Every structure is written in structure tokens, then in C-alpha cells.
Image: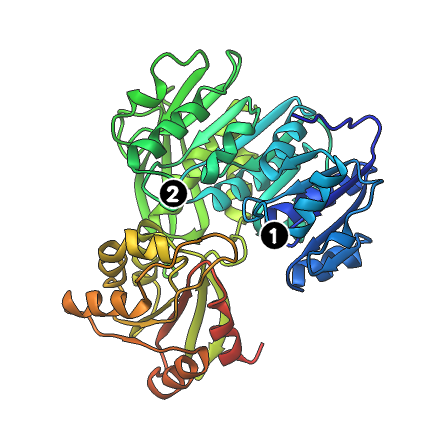
Amino acid sequence: MYQIDFRHPGKIHFIGIGGISMSGLAEILKDAGFEVSGSDSTKSAMTDMLQEKGIPVAIGQRESNITPDIECAVYTSAIRDTNPEFQAVRKLGIPVLSRAELLGQLMKNYKMPVAVSGTHGKTTTTSMISEILLHGNTDPTLSIGGILPSIGGNYRSGGHDYFVAEACEYTNSFLSFFPRIGVILNVEEDHMDFFKDLEDIRHSFREFAGLLPEDGALVINGEIPELSYFTEGLKCRVITYGWNDRFDYHPEEVSHDELARASFTLCRSSGDRQRFTLSVPGDHNVSNAMAAIAVADLLGIGRTITAGALKDFTGTDRRFEYKGQIGGVTVIDDYAHHPTEIAATLTAARNYPHKTLWCVFQPHTHSRTRAFLHEFAQALTLADRVVLAPIYEVTGREIEALDISSEHVCEEIRRLGKDAVCFPTFDEIEKFLLENCINGDLLITMGAGDVHKIGENLLGT
């Protein structure tokens, strides 16, 4: 594998630079003195932001974007061998690295790299850890899969002590990393267009745990089924958290305020008890916070600092994000696109003030929709009324056509006895909501695609 020389920065080109992770890595390299360029298939707010920061971005991927002076090309998992830029770099003999390989090489430049993995909760937990390190004035370098308001973006270039990054299992990306502290939040079925089955996914997470060195540590959700599969034989320290006293960290005296935000007493295995108050809703965020606290303890962050940071943390963009009100209807947007995430978000929302809880859900990829058809329907029944948008397909992600649509999810929800409707366009959904939502209702737009535009259009933002 090609190794980037960080002591002698050269020219790096990003194929697919508009992605949330790719854009952050591009900015980190630019801050480190590299000459950075990139391309993307479509113009977006992210490509505009990169250009404003002095990174040239070509819209449209073509052979002419590749020049012989490029030292290395970085590409995302969505880039196929047929991509004209990918073919051009191969033709010119320019070395290539995947996004994950570059991120792994970056980790080697830091004393304490932290990688946060899990089927869901990665962005929130990574952001919580980031907020704690920022409050502790540790000058961390951060690579987050969402926009963190306190840094005004999804990345931060800092010192060379702490590097915190999300670790995604898709295409086994996180197996290219070099963490000293690893976090496993949960292990469930997802990305079934890549993994064969749940056992294949579990094996991948076990391999991730095995990356940790003897002087490192694994923070893991102790309630993951057959936990010993992931921890047996590890040389590193293992720290568990969960909802009862069998684990190193567990909560007691959990309560919620009028906006579903939790307060809890954290019990450590040392016998120490400490009260925490969160500014993000839902019990799933209590679990995320326990993982973040365990990492903070490992890094020696003062406990008062940790508590203050978690109280100040109000979430990242598209994670139960308050968007505004129209006609007395509160509009929330959430990135949930896996059945477990949907259930967690809607459970939190049920504790939020409302008359009727509406969920506008946009399934993300045909393969995921087919794999979790019943589970999606079951989770969505936690809403009072459900509106289905067409499936959002990621360009280049799926090759074979799958006979599945949002109408199938709608039919399954109705079979479970819950009201659901499906529309082919956002315009029709917006018209339906304007005619049916009333003062006091709570409307959540949900999914990993562009479903957030529905709420934004209703609010005129």
C-alpha cells in the first residue's frame, strides 16, 4: 500500500470529495500543507464550502481532472473501476488509497487515536467525545460523520495528541484503522449489500477489536449478544457499559424532562457515583453518553469537565434536530435509517410534547429496505401516523435492480394496524402534511437521504 509522506506534503486528489468524511479529510490535509483538489458528480453545499476554503472542486468526474503531478488519489467506496478518473489515475500509474486507508494512515500521526464503531450511534458518540475533549482544552483533531455546531463543521485540525474519528464497518473500512482506543456501540444487521449475514458482520467487528494494541483499550456495550466472542483473547484492556450492575458503567435513577432529555446517576465499578444531565433526548443517548464517559475516563479528562461538556452538547445536525414551527406544528429532522435507530428516535419523540406524532420516512437503499421490510414497519408503528417517501438510492452503491419499493413498507405498516400513506413525490407529501397536520402536532422527517428538504420546504428555510 502506498504510504503518504506527511513530512513532505504533495498534491492529493479526492475522487468523490463531496462526501461528509472525504470533505473533512481533504480539509485536514490542506491544513497540514498538502495541495488538495477534488471532484464530485454533483454540486452541493459541501463542495461549495470546500471551494470557499480554497480547495478546487471539479463538478463532473472526467479524465481531464487527473494530471501527472498528482502524488496520490483518494477514492470512496462508491467509486467503481469504470469511473473515468479512477481509470485515468491507473493509466498514469498514480498511487491510490481508499478513504479508509488514508484515515488509517492519518491515525498513525497521533499519540492517542480513538475510533468509534457500531451499527448506529457513531456520529453522536464521536461528537460527545469530541465535545468533552474540546471542553478539556486538549486541542483534538476530529473527523465526524456529521456537522458539530461547536466546531462549525465535520472536522477540526488540532494538535498531535488526540485524534477522534468514526469507524464505519461498511466494506470493512474500519479494518484499515490504527486506534489505541476502540469503541463498539452495537452490532446488528446492516449494509446487507456488502455483508453476507449477521455472522459476517460480527466477524468484522471482532477483527476491529483485534486491531487494538496491548496498551490500548476497548470500550464495548456489554449487552451485545455473546459478548465474549468479541473480547476473548484480546491483549488490550476491556471496559463494558450497559443498563445493569454487571457492567463497569451503568446508569441508575434515570429521569426525563419535558423535552425527553435524560438525567441519570452513572455508577462506575469503582463505586463512584456521578450525576449527569443530557441536552439530547432519549435513553439511547444515555447509552451513547456512557461510552463517551468511559473514553473520557481513559484519557484522564476531569469528571466535572466531562459532565459539563455532555450538558452543553445539543447534538449534531440531523440527529433529532429541531427545525422550527409552522402553524403550531413542531418540525424535527433525524438521520435514522435502521430499524433500531427509528425505534429509538420515535420512543424519544413519544416523550416530547405533542398531540399527534407524524413520521415522514424515506427508506435508504433498496437492499436495506428489502432486508428489513418487516422491521422497518414494526419500528414505524411507534408513530401515530406514517408517510412514506420513495426509496433514496445512493449513486453507484447498488448494481442489481431489486423489486422493492416504499409501497411495500406502507402495506406492511397497514397490516400491523397502523395508518400509513405513500406518495411518489415530495410535493405531494408536503401538500398532504399541510392539509392534515394541526396545531400541537410533532412532525419528524426521517432518513439518511434528502427527506429533510420536506420539513425545510414547509418552513420556508
Depth-wise, is mark 2 or mark 1 nearer the camera? 1
The numbered disc on residue 286 is 2
Q: Position of residue 211 (x, y in %)?
A: 49, 20
Q: Position of residue 100 (x, y in %)?
A: 58, 35
The kind of residue tagged 1 is Gly
Residue, disc 1: 19
The answer to which image quadrant residue 227 occupies is top left
Q: Relative to 242, does residue 458 appear above or below in the rendering?
A: below
Q: Relative to 206, does residue 316 appear above or below in the rendering?
A: below
State the SS at label 1: loop
Q: Residues within 10 Å of mark 2 (few under 14, many from 20)?
A: many
The numbered disc on residue 454 is none
State the SS at label 2: helix
Q: Quadrant of the C terminus?
A: bottom right
In screen coordinates, is 383 left or right of 190? left
Residue at 71% x, 54% y: name it.
Answer: 39
Q: Position of residue 317 (x, y in %)?
A: 54, 57
The answer to which image quadrant residue 72 occupies is top right
Q: Relative to 304, does residue 235 appear above or below in the rendering?
A: above
Say which of 243 and 109 sits in front.
109
